[in-house]
Amino acid sequence: MVTINSPQGFNVTENMEHAFRDAHGFGIHECENNPDLLVKVEQKREKEYQQSLQVAARMDNQVHRNL
C-alpha cells in the first residue's frame, strides 16, 4: 500500500485518492488547496447526510406501521 502524506497531517492511500476522485471529480490534494472545492465537497456531504436521515425516518415509519 502506498501512502501519500497530506499537508494536514493524515496519510492518504492511493485507494482513498481514487475513491475521492470518483466521488467528486477531483483529488484530495486539489481539494486541500482550493477552498471552493472544499466547500463543494462539504455541501455534497451535507446533502447526502440529510437524504440518509430522510431514508432512515421513512424506514422507521414503515417498521412501526407493520407492528
Image (tube, rainbow, N blue to C red):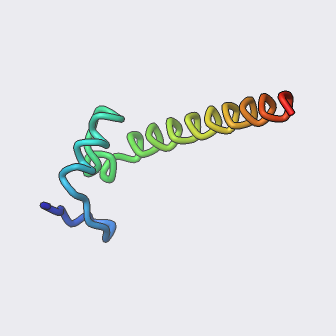
Residue at 22 percent of width and 49 percent of height: 15
Query: Which x, y percent locates residue 47?
Result: 58, 34
Q: Locate residue 13 relative to residue 37 in the image: left or right.
A: left
Camera-side residue of 36 and 16: 16
Name above or below for residue 41 compared with residue 62: below
Residue at figure coordinates x 18%, y 62% from the top left: 4
Front position in the image: 65 or 40 = 65
Q: Percent position (x, y) of residue 18?
A: 23, 43
| Residue lying furthest left | 2
The residue at 29%/49% (across/down) is 28
Above-or-below relation of 14 to 10? above
Query: Residue 67's quadrant in the figure?
Result: top right
Q: Residue at x 50, y 35 (%)?
A: 44
Q: Position of residue 23 (x, y in %)?
A: 35, 35
Residue found farthest to the bottom: 9
Indicate the quadrant containing the N terminus: top left, top right, bottom left or bottom right.
Answer: bottom left
